[in-house]
Amino acid sequence: MTMPKHDAEELIDNTEKTLKYIGIALGTLLGIAIGYFGVQLFNTWF
């Protein structure tokens, strides 16, 4: 199965964009989670 070069390049571009957005979303969620747990720990200790 051979794909025309244009389609293959477009697919790669879309995949890279998707991965970038997933990375941004995961990073944001991770930041919120770390901040939330940090506040919880802070409240427990002080």
Image (spheres, rainbow, N blue to C red):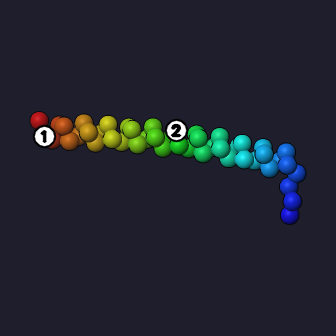
**Where's the N terminus, which quadrant?**
bottom right
Find numbered disc 2 in the image and state the secondary structure of the residue it sits on.
Answer: helix
Give the left or right position of residue 42, taking residue 13 as reference: left
Q: Quadrant of residue 40?
A: top left
- Residue picked out by circle 2: 24
Q: Amino acid at mark 1?
A: Trp
Q: Quadrant of residue 21?
A: top right
Q: In the picture shown, does residue 45 fall above or below 4?
A: above
**Where's the C terminus, which quadrant?**
top left
Q: Residue at x 75, y 47 (%)?
A: 11
Q: Residue at x 72, y 42 (%)?
A: 13
Tag 1: Cα neighbours inside 10 Å, few (<14), some, or many (≥20)? few
Q: CA distance from mark 2 to mark 1?
A: 31 Å
Of callouts 2 and 1, which one flags the residue occurring earlier in the amino acid sequence?
2
Tag 2: Cα neighbours inside 10 Å, few (<14), some, or many (≥20)? few
Q: Position of residue 18 (x, y in %)?
A: 63, 43
The tag on residue 18 is none
Q: Amino acid at mark 2?
A: Ile
- Residue picked out by circle 1: 45
